[in-house]
Amino acid sequence: MLKSRITEMLGIQYPIIQGGMAWLGLAELVAAVSNAGGLGIIGSVTFPTPEELRNEIRRTRKLTDKPFGVNITLLPAMRQLPNDGFVQVVVEEGVPVVETTAGRPEKYVDTLKRANVKVMHKVGSVRHAKNAEKIGCDAVIAVGFEGGGHPLMDDVSLWNLVPRMVDEVAIPVIAAGGTTDHRQMIAALALGAEAVLMGTVFMAAKESVAHPKFKQALINATECDTVLIQRSIKNQTRVLRNRTAEEVLNMESRGASLEELMPIIGGQRGKKALMLGEVDEGTMTCGQGVGLIKNELTVKEVIDGMVKEAETLLKRLNSLNRSQ
Ligand SMILES: Cc1cc2nc3c(=O)[nH]c(=O)nc-3n(C[C@H](O)[C@H](O)[C@H](O)COP(=O)(O)O)c2cc1C
């Protein structure tokens, strides 16, 4: 049950993927997701050099014999990333799948495909999905407005983005953004998605290296406790609502420049919030699905729970059909 073109393509048990996450997408979390039947993805942006990414891939291999992937972030604002070297390491290490995001993957698609690496590209619009298909990507990841990370500036909810994309491309569509539980997974599959990709729910998991105080802030948060910042600099990101996020919004509303914003939105302050538990001291991305996180669970508990409850939900939906 719960088989799709994505589970077949990736050789995984369930249509559940952990999106690449800066600082958090490390071997322990990634392997836990893959061991639980999903696909874990290492976040390459965490590593200053390709050799450090290679070490993480090897560390992950020691923890799981299941497939896992690597995220390559192509954000123009992160031009300094050694992405050419990351891609080379992915190929040399035989990683079976890459998640590209936030830019143009054209440069790498041929190299990756020649090496038999599946390419899943994250997009926030139908036009970008069509382009990804045209250049040879194997799947697209539709990122809805409610999601953590960088939802595109189009502000389209996953509820509308997935069916539109499914109608426009032939390659499989994966739904990302604001997904935390089995109900949303089944809804995404009903919309035509062939897997869900989640970040925030795994950020709060036991295997995540986020500070316990940050995880508690996620557990305390409701669906109203995220906010979109960096819209004024066209690099919109959804973050946990906190003191720094409010400060950024105030600065943006009075027209602050990128130079003024950088010291506040820069990664080092976000890292302080996430890794040192100084929750108000920086901005940290997180999706609206945070409202459904109630406890710190292991990855296996998250995935087993989703799958088991999805089966019950499907039975209920089936019984609705019979009663008509
Ligand atoms: C803490 C955190 C860090 C992230 N870092 C990256 C990243 O480096 N590259 C990337 O493509 N996406 C990144 N994302 C986005 C996720 O891969 C995924 O698309 C998103 O979290 C899905 O939305 P959700 O958080 O609402 O489930 C990050 C998300 C979180 C929560």
Image (tube, rainbow, N blue to C red):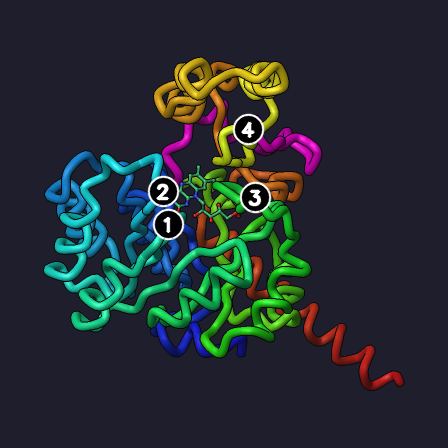
Is the residue under label 2 in contact with that under label 4 (CB below 8 Å)? no
Instruction: Choose top left, top right, bottom left or bottom right for residue 23.
Output: top left
> Separation of disc 3 and disc 1 at Cα?
14 Å
> Separation of disc 2 and disc 3 at Cα?
14 Å
Residue identifier under label 4? 232
Q: How many marks?
A: 4
Position of 106 compared to 50: left or right? right
Residue identifier under label 3? 153
Residue under the point 52% across and 71% down? 194
Mark 4 element type:
loop
Mark 2 element type:
loop
Asked if residue 16 is positioned above or below residue 55 in the image, the reply reads below
Asked if residue 274 is positioned above or below residue 101 in the image, the reply reads above
Residue type, label 3: Met
Along the polypeptide, which appears first: circle 4 or circle 3?
3
Is the residue under label 3 in contact with that under label 4 (CB below 8 Å)? no
Q: Quadrant of the C terminus?
A: bottom right
Is the residue under label 1 in contact with that under label 3 (CB below 8 Å)? no
Q: Is mark 2 within 8 Å of ligand 1?
A: yes
- Residue 103: give its label: 1
Along the polypeptide, which appears first: circle 3 or circle 1?
1
- Magenta stretch? 208-229
Along the polypeptide, which appears first: circle 2 or circle 1?
2
Residue type, label 2: Leu
Instruction: Choose top left, top right, bottom left or bottom right for residue 209.
Output: top left
**Residue closer to the observer: 61 or 206:** 61
Residue identifier under label 2? 75
Q: Residues within 10 Å of mark 4 (few under 14, many from 20)?
A: some
Residue 52 appears in the picture as rendered: yes
210 is within the stretch colored magenta = yes
Is the residue under label 1 in contact with that under label 2 (CB below 8 Å)? yes
Residue type, label 1: Gly
